[in-house]
Image (spheres, helix red, strand yellow):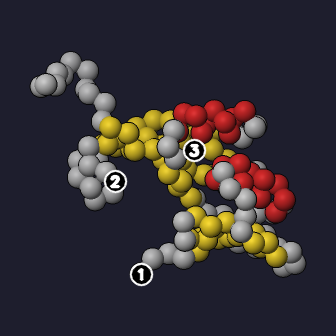
Amino acid sequence: MRAVQIAQRAEDLARATAFYTELLGTPPVASFDPPGLVFFDLEGQRLLLERGAPSALHYFLVDDIEATVSRLRATGTPVESEPHIIFTHRNDTLGPDGTDEVQAFVRDTEGNLVGLVQHRPCQPTVGTTTDE
């Protein structure tokens, strides 16, 4: 089983569509107004923007979290939390083994919290050495 669609509240569909087009780097694949639905394709999973949907917290995997936060900040997106390490993956249960999970949080145009995630090679701990 896999998730096929996630719905997100969007009171102003045009404004929310512009935000998610910028964030995702791709335009929507379908829009229906009425009734007020906008669909994005996330590699086979649909993100649905809908006026009547509840707010949901999405986490999007990005290649460069600092660049993504900077790009969004430049467009006026509120940054709720700067990039920071959440935890280190010691196995591949939740992410690539040997990586730090870095997260940041922004607010979309509709007030929904959006998580950004990057997996980076682990940073050495201060005072440790590595064998070559």
Residue that badge 3 annotates: 105
Q: Position of residue 78 (x, y in %)?
A: 69, 39
State the SS at label 3. strand
Residue that badge 1 annotates: 1
Residue 19 located left or right of residue 24: right
Q: Quadrant of the C terminus?
A: top left
The image quadrant that residue 123 belongs to is: top left
As drawn, 51 above or below 24 = below
Residue 128 located left or right of residue 52: left
- Specify few, some or many for label 2: CA neighbours under 10 Å numbering under 14, 14-19, or 20 or more: some
Residues tagged 2 and 1 counted as in contact (Cβ below 8 A): no
**Label 2 amino acid?**
Gly
As drawn, 64 above or below 26 = above
Residue that badge 2 annotates: 95
State the SS at label 1. loop
Q: Position of residue 20 (x, y in %)?
A: 70, 55
**Label 1 amino acid?**
Met
State the SS at label 2. loop
Residue at the image position 38 percent from the left and 39 percent from the top:
120
**Whole-number angstrom distance, CA of label 3 to CA of label 1:** 28 Å
Q: Position of residue 116 (x, y in %)?
A: 53, 47
- Specify few, some or many for label 1: CA neighbours under 10 Å numbering under 14, 14-19, or 20 or more: few
The image quadrant that residue 82 belongs to is: top right
Residue 64 visible in this rendered orientation of the protein: yes
**Whole-number angstrom distance, CA of label 2 to CA of label 3:** 19 Å
**Label 3 amino acid?**
Phe
**Whole-number angstrom distance, CA of label 2 to CA of label 1:** 19 Å
Nearer to me, 60 or 58: 60
